Image (spheres, grey):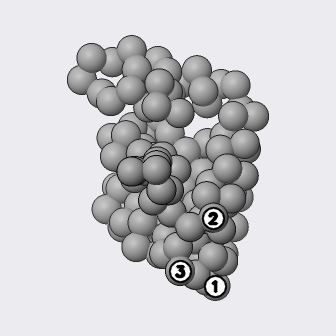
Amino acid sequence: TLSLELLKILLENAGPVFRTSPRFIDATKEYLCDAVVTNAAPSIPTAYQLACSVFLTLLTRFRQSLKAEVGFFFPMLMLKPLEVVHGAPLAPYSQRAILVMCLQKLCGDGQLLVDMFVNFDCDLDSSNLFERL
């Protein structure tokens, strides 16, 4: 969990030059998104919460550069665990509670919601993330 905490601090404090650096963007696309999903193990609530927090930071601060990644990882990390199949939730209560807190933070950012709608639901080649949210 220490590495996830360090990544979160780095991402939250990254300046505009760092956030727009092609080298950083490419590294984020290639390594960071996969690392977040790999560490989003619901069996370890602290690691799962940090992974979701890192993803939210990527979503709020780097969404302009990571549209394809957001379109892929958002449903997998934030929506799929909240689904109910055959009357039973896919994820345990602790994981769903963490997700609801993350979604509450996400819904507090009106511009982020507008961007998700415009960049995904209004784009014929993208999935309807806002509708599913």
Give the spatial CA distance, label 3 vs label 1: 17 Å
The residue that disc 2 covers is 93
First along the sequence among labels 2 and 1 = 1
| Spot occupied by residue 128 in the image (x, y as percentages of width and height) | 38, 26
Give the spatial CA distance, label 2 vs label 1: 24 Å
| Spot occupied by residue 71 in the image (x, y as percentages of width and height) | 37, 40
Q: Nearer the viewer, mark 2 or mark 3?
A: 2
First along the sequence among labels 3 and 1 = 1
Q: Amino acid at mark 2?
A: Tyr
First along the sequence among labels 2 and 3 = 3
Binning the other alpha carbons within 10 Å of mark 1 as few (below 14), some (14 to 19) or many (20 upward) gives few
Binning the other alpha carbons within 10 Å of mark 2 as few (below 14), some (14 to 19) or many (20 upward) gives few
Q: Quadrant of residue 26?
A: bottom left
Binning the other alpha carbons within 10 Å of mark 3 as few (below 14), some (14 to 19) or many (20 upward) gives few
Residue 2 visible in the picture: yes
Image disc number at residue 28? none
> In this image, 15 relative to 90: left or right?
right
Give the spatial CA distance, label 2 vs label 3: 11 Å
Are the residues at dot 3 and dot 1 in contact (C-beta closer than 8 Å)? no
Image disc number at residue 43? 3
Q: Residue at x 41, y 45 (%)?
A: 75
Image disc number at residue 2? 1
